[in-house]
Image: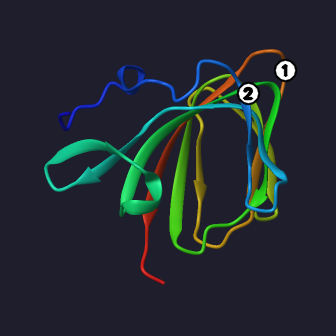
Amino acid sequence: MTNIIDIDAIGWKTEDYEDAYVETGEIEQHLVKVADYVSLKGSESETATASSESSYIGAYEYAPGGWITDHTHADAEQWYYILSGTGLMKVGDEERIAGQGHVVFVPRNAVHSYKVVGDEPLRLLNVAIFLSK
């Protein structure tokens, strides 16, 4: 891959919406499709797993009724760019409706979550930067 990334060309890990689970067996993400992650290393980009990299870009799409539970990241800051759809976005004590073109910043250790609002899927671009603890 190159440094100029077409997120639509990366591909989805699944064709259908699924639930994603945490280690305890509880649902963490409901009705989600996840694109392959693209890690950013030096001057080239490559598909990789998010946990093995210092930064990554990924795309998520949630069906109407979809959501991700409250959670935190002790080792990362994230930015979500809403490509389409509408979501009720929560970061810390702030909660509001956001749609196409909105950017949501999630600082390290901030409780955050979101859920789809309306009958259109919510599609997000996620950029994460992993920080040393």
> Of callouts 2 and 1, which one flags the residue occurring earlier in the amino acid sequence?
2
Q: Looking at the image, is 25 positioned above or below residue 66?
A: below
Three-letter residue code for mark 1: Gly
Residue farthest toward the bottom in the current orientation of the protein: 133
Quarter occupied by residue 99? top right
Q: Looking at the image, is 82 positioned above or below residue 47?
A: above
State the CA–CA distance, disc 2 to disc 1: 7 Å
> Which scheme is used to colour this image of the protein?
rainbow
* Circles 2, 1 touching at the beta carbon (< 8 Å): yes
Three-letter residue code for mark 2: Thr
Q: Is residue 10 left or right of residue 98?
A: left
Quarter occupied by residue 17? top right
Quarter occupied by residue 47? top left
- Sort mark 1 into few (<14), some (14-19) or many (20+) by Cα contacts within 10 Å: few
Q: Residue 7: x percent and y percent?
A: 39, 27
Q: Residue 116: x percent and y percent?
A: 79, 31
Q: Residue 57: x percent and y percent?
A: 42, 44
Q: Looking at the image, is 27 positioned above or below residue 16?
A: below
Picture disc at residue 85: none
Residue 116 in view here: no
Q: Residue at x 44, y 67 (%)?
A: 130
Q: Residue at x 52, y 63 (%)?
A: 77
Which quadrant: the N terminus? top left
Q: Is residue 107 left or right of residue 24?
A: left
Residue nearest the observer in this picture, 79 or 5:
5
Q: Residue at x 40, y 50 (%)?
A: 56
Residue farthest toward the left in the current orientation of the protein: 43
Residue nearest the observer in this picture, 96 or 63:
63
Q: Which residue is mark 1?
A: 118
| Kind of element beneath mark 2 | strand
| Kind of element beneath mark 1 | loop
Picture disc at residue 86: 2
